[in-house]
Image: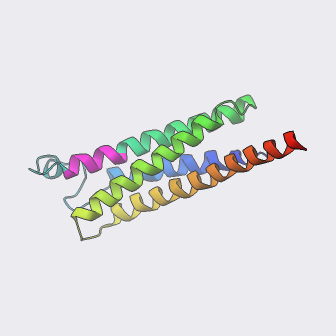
Amino acid sequence: MVPYYGEALVLYSAFVLQLVAISSEGWICGRIYSNCFLNEPHPFTSITLALLVIATIFTLIAAILQTICIVKHTERYLLYSKISTFCAAIFGVAGIFYYFDLFFKQYWSQHIAGFVAGITTGLSAYQMTNVFQEVFENCRLRKG
């Protein structure tokens, strides 16, 4: 079994969890896209929402690219999927850190979004380690 089969399932799970985190009422003002949040004089809520939505989109793109690789039995899009996963991790972690920097009260949605950011960060680190391992093995095989 190819190792990226499981990565697609993890990415789809992270995508669904991210949608739950964004749409639930566990944020400080209820929903993150409510009028209470979006009509604030400070732009932190719209920035947090934008970062989380961008992370969600990158997660979906990575999952779709992984699925294409599985269905077509090719590794053509794996690098793009790994880059997309890395971008999702960056935006997810940035959104959560930005939010926690401004609020000290913790609610469940932030925990879910933080969990998803951790999942994508861990998966991104795993994928990048695999890329470096393949590069080093290919270099060793060429020399030997």
Q: Residue at x 26, y 64 (%)?
A: 101
Q: Residue at x 65, y 37 (%)?
A: 78
Q: Residue at x 17, y 51 (%)?
A: 37
Q: Residue furthest front?
A: 143
Q: Is residue 132 above or below residue 28?
A: above
Chief secondary structure of the magenta span?
Answer: helix
Q: Residue furthest bottom?
A: 105
- Quarter of the image with the C terminus is top right
> Percent position (x, y) of residue 113?
40, 57
> Percent position (x, y) of residue 116?
46, 56
> Percent position (x, y) of residue 49?
29, 47
Q: Residue furthest left?
A: 41
> Percent position (x, y) of residue 99?
28, 59
Q: Which residues are magenta?
A: 44-52
Q: Specify the color scheme.
A: rainbow
Answer whether residue 47 is magenta in the image.
Answer: yes
Does 19 sit left or right of 60 as displayed? Answer: left
Does 115 sit left or right of 43 as displayed? Answer: right
Front-most of 29 and 140? 140
- Tally of numbered discs: 0
Q: Is residue 101 above or below residue 20?
A: below
Q: Residue at x 43, y 39 (%)?
A: 57
Does 127 sit left or right of 33 as displayed? Answer: right
Residue 4, by quadrant, is: top right
Does 37 sit left or right of 135 as displayed? Answer: left
Front-most of 115 and 136? 136
In this orientation, does residue 107 appear? Answer: yes
Answer whether residue 130 is magenta in the image.
Answer: no
In this orientation, does residue 26 appear? Answer: no
